[in-house]
Protein backbone atom coordinates (compact mmCIF):
# COMPACT_ATOMS: atom_id res chain seq x y z
CA UNK A 1 0.00 0.00 0.00
CA UNK A 2 1.43 3.36 -1.01
CA UNK A 3 1.24 6.35 1.30
CA UNK A 4 2.58 9.84 0.62
CA UNK A 5 4.03 10.65 4.03
CA UNK A 6 6.01 13.51 2.48
CA UNK A 7 2.74 15.37 1.95
CA UNK A 8 2.67 15.97 5.71
CA UNK A 9 6.02 17.78 5.76
CA UNK A 10 6.20 21.56 5.97
CA UNK A 11 5.74 22.77 2.38
CA UNK A 12 8.71 25.19 2.45
CA UNK A 13 11.25 22.42 3.13
CA UNK A 14 13.35 21.33 0.17
CA UNK A 15 14.06 17.67 -0.48
CA UNK A 16 17.67 16.79 0.40
CA UNK A 17 19.55 14.63 -2.10
CA UNK A 18 20.87 11.24 -1.09
CA UNK A 19 24.56 11.11 -0.19
CA UNK A 20 26.65 9.69 -3.02
CA UNK A 21 30.15 10.55 -1.77
CA UNK A 22 32.50 13.46 -2.29
CA UNK A 23 33.42 14.51 -5.85
CA UNK A 24 36.92 13.62 -7.05
CA UNK A 25 38.02 17.27 -6.92
CA UNK A 26 36.32 18.72 -3.86
CA UNK A 27 37.01 22.42 -3.30
CA UNK A 28 33.84 23.26 -1.33
CA UNK A 29 32.84 23.30 2.32
CA UNK A 30 35.10 23.81 5.30
CA UNK A 31 36.87 20.46 5.25
CA UNK A 32 40.38 20.30 6.66
CA UNK A 33 43.64 18.46 6.06
CA UNK A 34 43.03 14.80 6.93
CA UNK A 35 46.74 14.04 7.27
CA UNK A 36 46.98 16.67 10.03
CA UNK A 37 44.25 15.21 12.24
CA UNK A 38 46.15 14.21 15.43
CA UNK A 39 44.66 10.74 15.60
CA UNK A 40 47.11 9.09 17.99
CA UNK A 41 47.13 12.01 20.41
CA UNK A 42 43.32 12.10 20.39
CA UNK A 43 43.21 8.37 21.09
CA UNK A 44 45.58 8.81 24.01
CA UNK A 45 43.54 11.74 25.30
CA UNK A 46 40.32 9.74 25.07
CA UNK A 47 41.88 6.82 26.97
CA UNK A 48 43.25 9.08 29.70
CA UNK A 49 40.13 11.17 30.30
CA UNK A 50 37.74 8.22 30.13
CA UNK A 51 39.87 6.27 32.57
CA UNK A 52 39.84 9.18 34.98
CA UNK A 53 36.35 10.65 34.54
CA UNK A 54 34.36 8.28 32.34
CA UNK A 55 31.71 7.61 34.96
CA UNK A 56 30.60 11.23 34.83
CA UNK A 57 29.03 10.38 31.45
CA UNK A 58 26.22 8.91 33.56
CA UNK A 59 24.88 12.42 34.19
CA UNK A 60 23.91 15.20 31.85
CA UNK A 61 26.49 18.00 31.70
CA UNK A 62 29.32 15.86 33.20
CA UNK A 63 28.77 17.57 36.58
CA UNK A 64 30.05 20.77 34.93
CA UNK A 65 26.65 22.40 34.39
CA UNK A 66 24.82 23.41 31.21
CA UNK A 67 27.66 25.65 29.92
CA UNK A 68 29.73 22.56 29.09
CA UNK A 69 32.77 20.65 30.35
CA UNK A 70 34.61 22.95 32.76
CA UNK A 71 38.21 21.94 31.88
CA UNK A 72 37.59 22.82 28.23
CA UNK A 73 36.12 26.18 29.22
CA UNK A 74 39.19 26.77 31.41
CA UNK A 75 41.46 25.99 28.46
CA UNK A 76 39.53 28.37 26.22
CA UNK A 77 39.66 31.21 28.74
CA UNK A 78 43.46 30.92 28.93
CA UNK A 79 43.86 30.51 25.14
CA UNK A 80 41.68 33.52 24.33
CA UNK A 81 43.61 35.64 26.81
CA UNK A 82 46.95 34.63 25.32
CA UNK A 83 46.02 34.71 21.63
CA UNK A 84 43.24 37.30 21.33
CA UNK A 85 43.72 39.59 24.33
CA UNK A 86 40.34 38.63 25.81
CA UNK A 87 39.78 38.57 29.59
CA UNK A 88 37.15 35.88 29.93
CA UNK A 89 35.56 34.15 32.92
CA UNK A 90 35.06 30.44 32.10
CA UNK A 91 31.47 30.93 33.26
CA UNK A 92 30.99 33.33 30.33
CA UNK A 93 31.75 30.55 27.81
CA UNK A 94 29.02 28.27 26.43
CA UNK A 95 30.14 25.14 24.56
CA UNK A 96 28.03 24.39 21.49
CA UNK A 97 27.58 21.76 18.79
CA UNK A 98 29.88 23.57 16.40
CA UNK A 99 29.89 27.30 15.76
CA UNK A 100 26.82 26.90 13.53
CA UNK A 101 24.75 26.13 16.60
CA UNK A 102 26.30 29.21 18.13
CA UNK A 103 25.07 31.34 15.21
CA UNK A 104 21.59 29.87 15.48
CA UNK A 105 21.45 30.39 19.25
CA UNK A 106 22.51 34.03 19.02
CA UNK A 107 19.94 34.70 16.30
CA UNK A 108 17.24 32.93 18.32
CA UNK A 109 18.05 34.98 21.41
CA UNK A 110 18.45 38.35 19.67
CA UNK A 111 16.24 38.59 16.60
CA UNK A 112 12.57 39.12 15.95
CA UNK A 113 11.03 39.54 12.46
CA UNK A 114 11.66 43.02 11.10
CA UNK A 115 14.91 43.63 12.98
CA UNK A 116 17.85 45.16 11.13
CA UNK A 117 21.28 43.49 11.12
CA UNK A 118 24.47 44.95 9.63
CA UNK A 119 26.65 42.43 7.76
CA UNK A 120 29.69 42.49 5.53
CA UNK A 121 28.80 42.41 1.83
CA UNK A 122 31.02 39.36 1.21
CA UNK A 123 30.46 36.95 4.04
CA UNK A 124 30.02 33.43 5.35
CA UNK A 125 27.42 32.00 2.99
CA UNK A 126 25.35 30.48 5.78
CA UNK A 127 24.62 33.78 7.48
CA UNK A 128 22.43 35.16 4.68
CA UNK A 129 19.72 32.43 4.74
CA UNK A 130 19.83 32.31 8.54
CA UNK A 131 19.05 36.00 8.81
CA UNK A 132 16.37 35.68 6.14
CA UNK A 133 14.69 32.86 8.07
CA UNK A 134 14.74 35.05 11.17
CA UNK A 135 12.90 37.74 9.21
CA UNK A 136 15.78 40.22 9.58
CA UNK A 137 16.55 43.07 7.20
CA UNK A 138 20.21 43.03 6.15
CA UNK A 139 22.27 46.18 5.58
CA UNK A 140 25.47 45.21 3.74
CA UNK A 141 28.86 46.93 4.05
CA UNK A 142 31.58 46.57 1.38
CA UNK A 143 34.86 44.83 2.19
CA UNK A 144 38.35 45.42 0.83
CA UNK A 145 41.85 44.06 1.37
CA UNK A 146 41.73 44.94 5.09
CA UNK A 147 38.26 43.71 5.90
CA UNK A 148 35.09 45.72 6.34
CA UNK A 149 35.16 49.27 4.96
CA UNK A 150 34.81 51.25 8.19
CA UNK A 151 34.00 54.53 6.45
CA UNK A 152 31.07 52.83 4.72
CA UNK A 153 30.06 51.31 8.08
CA UNK A 154 30.05 54.76 9.69
CA UNK A 155 27.95 56.15 6.85
CA UNK A 156 25.45 53.30 7.14
CA UNK A 157 25.10 53.86 10.89
CA UNK A 158 24.45 57.56 10.28
CA UNK A 159 21.77 56.77 7.67
CA UNK A 160 20.06 54.26 9.94
CA UNK A 161 20.08 56.71 12.83
CA UNK A 162 18.57 59.42 10.63
CA UNK A 163 15.83 56.95 9.64
CA UNK A 164 15.14 56.08 13.27
CA UNK A 165 16.41 52.50 12.85
CA UNK A 166 18.42 50.87 15.64
CA UNK A 167 20.16 47.71 14.36
CA UNK A 168 20.23 44.63 16.57
CA UNK A 169 23.90 43.87 15.93
CA UNK A 170 26.86 43.97 13.56
CA UNK A 171 27.84 40.49 12.34
CA UNK A 172 31.52 40.55 11.39
CA UNK A 173 34.43 38.16 10.66
CA UNK A 174 37.51 40.31 11.38
CA UNK A 175 40.18 37.61 11.68
CA UNK A 176 40.78 35.45 8.58
CA UNK A 177 37.60 36.58 6.89
CA UNK A 178 35.42 34.09 5.05
CA UNK A 179 35.65 34.13 2.04
CA UNK A 180 38.35 36.78 1.42
CA UNK A 181 40.91 35.58 4.00
CA UNK A 182 41.72 39.12 5.17
CA UNK A 183 42.72 40.11 8.72
CA UNK A 184 41.36 43.46 9.86
CA UNK A 185 44.19 45.62 11.27
CA UNK A 186 44.08 47.01 14.79
CA UNK A 187 43.29 50.58 13.72
CA UNK A 188 40.13 49.47 11.95
CA UNK A 189 39.11 47.28 14.89
CA UNK A 190 39.44 50.22 17.23
CA UNK A 191 37.27 52.36 14.92
CA UNK A 192 34.63 49.61 14.72
CA UNK A 193 34.56 49.35 18.52
CA UNK A 194 34.31 53.15 18.88
CA UNK A 195 31.48 53.42 16.34
CA UNK A 196 29.55 50.63 18.02
CA UNK A 197 29.91 52.38 21.38
CA UNK A 198 28.79 55.67 19.87
CA UNK A 199 25.67 54.11 18.35
CA UNK A 200 24.86 51.64 21.15
CA UNK A 201 25.35 48.67 18.84
CA UNK A 202 26.18 45.07 19.90
CA UNK A 203 28.88 43.20 17.98
CA UNK A 204 28.54 39.58 16.87
CA UNK A 205 32.14 38.48 16.16
CA UNK A 206 32.71 35.21 14.28
CA UNK A 207 36.28 33.96 14.82
CA UNK A 208 36.15 30.41 13.44
CA UNK A 209 39.39 30.69 11.45
CA UNK A 210 41.47 32.83 13.79
CA UNK A 211 43.84 29.98 14.75
CA UNK A 212 44.83 29.46 11.11
CA UNK A 213 47.33 32.27 10.57
CA UNK A 214 50.66 31.46 8.95
CA UNK A 215 52.65 33.87 11.13
CA UNK A 216 50.87 32.85 14.32
CA UNK A 217 50.30 36.53 15.13
CA UNK A 218 46.98 38.36 15.11
CA UNK A 219 45.42 41.60 16.40
CA UNK A 220 43.25 41.52 19.53
CA UNK A 221 39.69 40.36 19.05
CA UNK A 222 36.86 42.88 19.03
CA UNK A 223 35.76 41.10 22.23
CA UNK A 224 39.01 42.36 23.78
CA UNK A 225 38.39 45.93 22.63
CA UNK A 226 34.68 46.11 23.43
CA UNK A 227 33.93 43.22 25.80
CA UNK A 228 30.78 44.79 27.23
CA UNK A 229 28.96 44.60 23.87
CA UNK A 230 30.56 41.69 21.98
CA UNK A 231 29.26 38.17 21.48
CA UNK A 232 32.23 36.11 20.27
CA UNK A 233 31.86 32.76 18.50
CA UNK A 234 34.65 30.28 17.76
CA UNK A 235 35.21 26.65 16.87
CA UNK A 236 37.53 23.66 17.09
CA UNK A 237 36.36 22.52 13.64
CA UNK A 238 39.16 24.32 11.80
CA UNK A 239 41.95 23.89 14.36
CA UNK A 240 41.38 20.20 15.22
CA UNK A 241 38.70 18.46 13.13
CA UNK A 242 35.34 19.50 11.64
CA UNK A 243 33.54 16.27 12.53
CA UNK A 244 34.09 16.77 16.27
CA UNK A 245 31.38 19.48 16.19
CA UNK A 246 32.55 21.56 19.13
CA UNK A 247 32.22 25.33 19.10
CA UNK A 248 31.72 28.01 21.72
CA UNK A 249 30.10 31.34 22.50
CA UNK A 250 31.79 33.95 24.71
CA UNK A 251 29.58 36.76 25.98
CA UNK A 252 28.73 38.78 29.07
CA UNK A 253 26.53 36.72 31.37
CA UNK A 254 23.64 39.17 30.97
CA UNK A 255 23.20 38.04 27.34
CA UNK A 256 24.78 34.58 27.61
CA UNK A 257 22.09 33.63 30.15
CA UNK A 258 19.45 34.45 27.54
CA UNK A 259 21.32 32.55 24.84
CA UNK A 260 21.56 29.54 27.17
CA UNK A 261 17.81 29.61 27.68
CA UNK A 262 17.40 29.08 23.91
CA UNK A 263 19.59 25.92 23.97
CA UNK A 264 17.12 23.05 24.36
CA UNK A 265 19.35 20.04 23.58
CA UNK A 266 20.34 18.97 27.13
CA UNK A 267 23.97 19.76 26.31
CA UNK A 268 26.30 19.35 23.35
CA UNK A 269 28.35 16.18 22.84
CA UNK A 270 30.15 15.50 26.13
CA UNK A 271 32.72 12.94 25.02
CA UNK A 272 34.11 15.30 22.38
CA UNK A 273 34.46 18.04 24.99
CA UNK A 274 36.31 15.73 27.38
CA UNK A 275 38.73 14.50 24.72
CA UNK A 276 39.41 18.00 23.41
CA UNK A 277 40.16 19.36 26.87
CA UNK A 278 42.63 16.55 27.51
CA UNK A 279 44.28 16.93 24.09
CA UNK A 280 44.41 20.71 23.97
CA UNK A 281 46.02 21.17 27.37
CA UNK A 282 49.11 19.29 26.16
CA UNK A 283 49.19 19.64 22.38
CA UNK A 284 47.09 22.52 21.00
CA UNK A 285 49.80 25.07 20.12
CA UNK A 286 52.20 22.54 18.58
CA UNK A 287 49.38 20.93 16.60
CA UNK A 288 48.11 24.24 15.19
CA UNK A 289 51.62 25.28 14.14
CA UNK A 290 52.03 21.98 12.26
CA UNK A 291 48.57 22.30 10.70
CA UNK A 292 49.31 25.83 9.50
CA UNK A 293 52.50 24.68 7.78
CA UNK A 294 50.53 21.99 5.94
CA UNK A 295 47.77 24.42 4.95
CA UNK A 296 50.20 27.05 3.68
CA UNK A 297 51.91 24.44 1.51
CA UNK A 298 48.54 23.55 -0.02
CA UNK A 299 47.80 27.22 -0.64
CA UNK A 300 51.12 27.48 -2.47
CA UNK A 301 50.14 24.47 -4.60
CA UNK A 302 46.79 26.08 -5.42
CA UNK A 303 48.33 29.41 -6.40
CA UNK A 304 50.90 27.63 -8.58
CA UNK A 305 48.10 25.69 -10.30
CA UNK A 306 46.09 28.87 -10.92
CA UNK A 307 49.16 30.58 -12.33
CA UNK A 308 49.84 27.63 -14.60
CA UNK A 309 46.32 27.03 -15.89
CA UNK A 310 44.69 30.48 -15.73
CA UNK A 311 47.65 32.86 -15.74
CA UNK A 312 46.74 36.53 -15.47
CA UNK A 313 43.12 35.92 -16.46
CA UNK A 314 42.12 35.42 -12.80
CA UNK A 315 42.62 37.76 -9.84
CA UNK A 316 43.20 36.95 -6.17
CA UNK A 317 45.14 38.10 -3.12
CA UNK A 318 47.22 35.59 -1.19
CA UNK A 319 45.58 35.26 2.23
CA UNK A 320 47.62 35.32 5.47
CA UNK A 321 45.79 32.27 6.77
CA UNK A 322 42.66 30.13 6.58
CA UNK A 323 41.50 27.45 4.16
CA UNK A 324 39.95 29.47 1.32
CA UNK A 325 41.09 31.41 -1.72
CA UNK A 326 38.65 33.99 -3.13
CA UNK A 327 39.21 34.11 -6.89
CA UNK A 328 37.84 36.52 -9.50
CA UNK A 329 37.24 34.83 -12.84
CA UNK A 330 37.71 36.31 -16.31
CA UNK A 331 35.15 38.66 -17.83
CA UNK A 332 32.15 36.78 -19.17
CA UNK A 333 32.37 33.80 -16.80
CA UNK A 334 29.31 33.22 -14.62
CA UNK A 335 30.48 31.37 -11.53
CA UNK A 336 27.05 29.89 -10.75
CA UNK A 337 26.85 28.31 -14.20
CA UNK A 338 30.50 27.28 -13.99
CA UNK A 339 29.89 25.55 -10.65
CA UNK A 340 26.95 23.61 -12.10
CA UNK A 341 28.91 22.45 -15.15
CA UNK A 342 32.05 21.65 -13.16
CA UNK A 343 30.10 19.67 -10.54
CA UNK A 344 28.76 17.39 -13.28
CA UNK A 345 32.38 16.72 -14.22
CA UNK A 346 33.59 16.00 -10.69
CA UNK A 347 34.99 19.44 -9.78
CA UNK A 348 33.16 21.18 -6.93
CA UNK A 349 33.64 24.93 -6.26
CA UNK A 350 31.50 27.49 -4.42
CA UNK A 351 30.00 30.18 -6.70
CA UNK A 352 30.40 33.76 -5.54
CA UNK A 353 26.70 34.59 -5.25
CA UNK A 354 26.48 32.22 -2.28
CA UNK A 355 29.15 34.23 -0.44
CA UNK A 356 28.61 37.81 -1.52
CA UNK A 357 25.85 40.34 -2.14
CA UNK A 358 28.23 42.48 -4.21
CA UNK A 359 27.32 43.50 -7.74
CA UNK A 360 30.18 41.48 -9.29
CA UNK A 361 29.65 38.38 -7.13
CA UNK A 362 28.89 36.31 -10.21
CA UNK A 363 32.54 36.47 -11.30
CA UNK A 364 33.94 35.07 -8.04
CA UNK A 365 34.46 31.56 -6.72
CA UNK A 366 35.57 30.33 -3.32
CA UNK A 367 38.10 27.48 -3.40
CA UNK A 368 38.73 25.41 -0.26
CA UNK A 369 42.28 24.09 -0.52
CA UNK A 370 42.60 22.40 2.89
CA UNK A 371 41.43 18.87 2.16
CA UNK A 372 42.77 17.81 -1.27
CA UNK A 373 46.41 16.80 -1.59
CA UNK A 374 48.66 19.02 -3.79
CA UNK A 375 48.46 16.61 -6.73
CA UNK A 376 44.65 16.64 -6.61
CA UNK A 377 44.68 20.43 -6.36
CA UNK A 378 46.81 20.73 -9.48
CA UNK A 379 44.71 18.29 -11.51
CA UNK A 380 41.42 19.77 -10.32
CA UNK A 381 42.39 23.33 -11.20
CA UNK A 382 43.57 22.17 -14.60
CA UNK A 383 40.18 20.58 -15.23
CA UNK A 384 38.41 23.71 -14.04
CA UNK A 385 40.46 25.78 -16.48
CA UNK A 386 39.55 23.45 -19.33
CA UNK A 387 35.86 23.76 -18.44
CA UNK A 388 36.15 27.56 -18.34
CA UNK A 389 37.75 27.57 -21.77
CA UNK A 390 35.23 25.16 -23.30
CA UNK A 391 32.13 26.82 -21.84
CA UNK A 392 33.05 30.51 -21.65
CA UNK A 393 35.90 30.96 -24.13
CA UNK A 394 38.47 32.00 -21.54
CA UNK A 395 42.07 32.27 -22.81
CA UNK A 396 43.49 28.97 -23.99
CA UNK A 397 46.97 29.77 -22.72
CA UNK A 398 47.48 29.79 -18.99
CA UNK A 399 50.71 31.31 -17.74
CA UNK A 400 53.43 30.20 -20.17
CA UNK A 401 51.97 26.79 -20.92
CA UNK A 402 49.28 25.87 -23.44
CA UNK A 403 46.78 23.48 -21.90
CA UNK A 404 46.48 20.07 -23.45
CA UNK A 405 43.25 19.53 -25.33
Image (cartoon, rainbow, N blue to C red):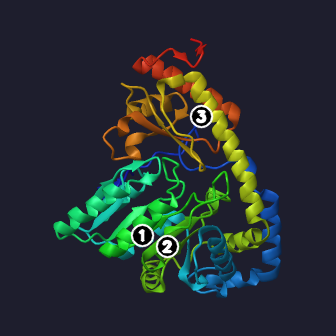
Q: Is residue 141 left or right of residue 313?
A: left
Q: How far apart in space, not on screen, are marks 3 and 1 (Cα)? A: 41 Å
Q: Judge the density around disc 2: few (<14), some (14-19), many (≥20) Cα neighbours within 10 Å.
A: some
- Identify which residue is drawn at 48% across, 85% down: 253
Query: In terms of depth relative to the viewer, which is nearer, 311 or 298?
Result: 311
**Residue that mark 1 sits on:** 193
On residue 99, the disc is none
Please tell me whether mark 3 or mark 1 is closer to you in this view: 1
Q: How far apart in space, not on screen, are marks 3 and 2 (Cα)? A: 41 Å
Quadrant holding the C terminus? top right
Task: For the residues labelled 2 and 1, say whether their Cβ atoms are less than 8 Å apart.
Answer: yes
Secondary structure at numbered mark 1? helix
x and y percent of residue 112 in the render? 28, 72
Task: For the residues labelled 3 and 1, say whether their Cβ atoms are less than 8 Å apart.
Answer: no
Task: For the residues labelled 3 and 2, say whether their Cβ atoms are less than 8 Å apart.
Answer: no
**Residue that mark 3 sits on:** 25
- Identify which residue is drawn at 46% across, 64% down: 189
- Dot placed on the residue nearer the N-terminal end, 3 or 2: 3
Residue 129 seen: no
**Residue that mark 2 sits on:** 225
x and y percent of residue 323 in the render? 59, 47
Q: How far apart in space, not on screen, are marks 2 and 1 (Cα)? A: 7 Å
Secondary structure at numbered mark 2? helix
- Identify which residue is drawn at 44% across, 79% down: 259
Q: Is residue 246 above or below residue 259?
A: above
Amino acid sequence: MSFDIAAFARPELAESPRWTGFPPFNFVGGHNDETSVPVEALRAAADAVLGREGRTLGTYFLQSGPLGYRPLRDFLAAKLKRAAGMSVDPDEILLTSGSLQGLDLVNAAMLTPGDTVIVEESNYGGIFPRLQRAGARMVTIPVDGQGMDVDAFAAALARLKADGVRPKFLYIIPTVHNPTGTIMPLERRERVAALCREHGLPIFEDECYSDLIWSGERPPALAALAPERTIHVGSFSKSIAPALRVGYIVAPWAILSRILSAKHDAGSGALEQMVLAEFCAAHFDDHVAKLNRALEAKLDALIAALDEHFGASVEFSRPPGGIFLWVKLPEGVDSTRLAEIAAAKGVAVNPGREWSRGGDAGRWIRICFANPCPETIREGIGRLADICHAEFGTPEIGGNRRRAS
